[in-house]
Image (cartoon, helix red, strand yellow):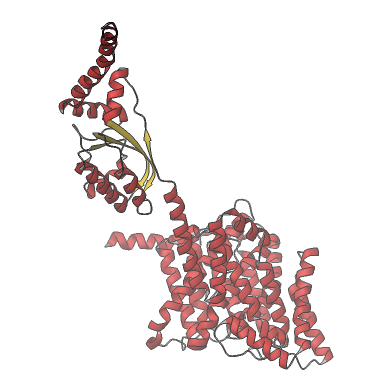
Amino acid sequence: MRTAIGSLGDRLTGLLPGRRDVAHMRRNARRDLLAGLTVAVVALPLALGFGVSSGLGAEAGLATAVVAGALAAVFGGSDLQVSGPTGAMTVVLVPIVAEHGPSGVLAVGLMAGVLLVVLAVLRAGKYMRYVPAPVVEGFTLGIACVIALQQIPNALGVDKPEGERVLVVAWRALSDFAQHPNWTAAGLALAVAAVMLLGARRWPMVPFSILAVAGATVLVQLAGLDAVSPIGDLPAGLPAPSLAFLDPAVLGSLLAPAVAVAALAALESLLSASVADGMTAGQRHDPDRELFGQGLANIAAPVFGGVPATGAIARTAVNVRTGASSRLASLVHAAVLAAIVFTLAPLVSRIPLAALAGVLLATAVRMVEVGSLRAMAGATRSDALVLVLTAVTTLALDLVYAVVIGLAVAGVLALRAVARQARLDEVPLDRGEHSAEEHTLLAEHIVAYRLDGPLFFAAAHQFLLELSAAADVRVVILRMSRVTTVDATGALALKDAVEKLNRRGIVVTASGIRPAHRRPLAAVGVLALLRLGEGEYATTPEAVRAARAHLERAGVLARASRTAHKEAEEPALAKRILPEEAHG
């Protein structure tokens, strides 16, 4: 018991910040301060927009960016990660808001945070690397489409229609716009999106999002465009911490959404941290510590009225590109947003919703990497299928189903590809020390098959059919040195095939069985069936000698030898008789 407690304590200690983090923050403090300020400028409209899109309001997005951004920066496993509300999380939160209300979202966020901490303690971070790239690209494409569709009501200046599916809501919003068009809102949204997309091509380091939003806000105020709705009143500061949203009676019904939110937070955060690693030299994140930091961030954010948070790929990329070298930049980003909340809330409240919709439309467009999609779709048909299926499922159902279905289909296709590598080939016997006559006799009664590749459930049936149809011989030698893996299903199929050969009077033995494969083969009784003479054989020549000894004991070789001599004498005798008959 003490050992288990000590091990748990060591794990928790390893997840906490250390002196290295503090020392690293002092190296390039000025550069980190500038990077943090730049990221805050980029993050402000995104935090507001994703807060509005989630259904909890702009203040929830700001609270998430401040609280979760600061805690994830301190306790996370990446020096460069920037955390906060994201579009992917918004996609998951919208149906939760519709079904359980704002308090349900806050409870889900807290529960998801606890789950993330548990995953970190269990060291589950390393398993996230096994998510296939087509799944990641597919749900990124699907998320981008969902984010764009979610912005249609605000971009068109219409009230958000009723409905749970984003496609239905977007279609109803288009119908309302067709009946009562609001060209001011639509033009403002398109203008903001165009400024961001076109400006970033020419001057990628300029924060066009905040410039476009500020310009749109000034235009609306000066021109008195009442047709465009603003964000509305914002509190001058963060809400007081509270757990009033927790209702023990409904926690059970919120467990499934909490698992989905935790899975998404883990996946997106670790993906974003990996992207940051790839953009720098020498930076490597700690996946378990990253989960721990995200867990603490998601536990704290709902207490202040914030939505669940994850690592944000776009903001993290801006952080890296502007020269950030430590987690100080992420802390500065959160501090600047906090200062904005406390000092500029009245100004922020006047930002038009259509302008925020334009920011998120441009963000959705930027999320789609056309080159990466082309490369993934052109790699293999399986990759293309997984990508398209994941994207369509994200759009038609939700992100959690999309990831699960994408992983399942990718796994099945991968197993099929591996199973196709399994082969069973007949190989000629080595002559060795045998004479030509002996080798010919042995080849008539002994056949060797080489098993190549995996012997597992996906390929077992193929092995069973091919091996059971072995030629009519006395001994079958299975050369198993090239078998890569064996599971219970494969071992049972091999046993079935061996038993069928035994019933035909054919003895089966094996050579080159790897030590790692002995356990499943012994468990189902295959090893007992493969014993010939002394047992198993390390090499094929040893198995051939044992097979020859078996044939000699059975008198097969002697009879075969006499038959062969007799058949060889008959043509010679015929040659002697035929001339005599001719003279007779």
Residue at screen point 38% across, 51% down: 459
Q: Nearest the camera: 339 or 347?
A: 347
> Residue at point 44% right, 64% down?
120
Q: Which x, y percent locates residue 88? A: 57, 73
Location of residue 254 by image quarter: bottom left
Q: How many marks?
A: 0
Question: 208 left or right of 283?
Answer: right
Of 308 and 154, which appears nearest the observer? 154
Asked if residue 97 shows in the view, the reply is yes
Q: Is residue 326 above or below residue 107?
A: above
Q: Is residue 498 left or right of residue 244?
A: left
Q: Is residue 325 visible?
A: no
Image point 33% across, 48% down: which residue? 465
Q: 278 and 433: which one is in front?
A: 433
Q: Is residue 513 above or below residue 95?
A: above
Residue 105 on image: x %, y %: 50, 83
Quarter of the image where the C terminus is located: top left
Find the residue positioned furthest to the right: 223
Q: Nearer the viewer, residue 140 or 397?
A: 397
The spot of residue 537 in percent (x, y) is: 26, 33
Q: Residue at x 59, y 64 (%)?
A: 81
Image coordinates for residue 40, horizontal then vertical, percent: 68, 72
The single residue placed furthest to the front in the displayed view is 584
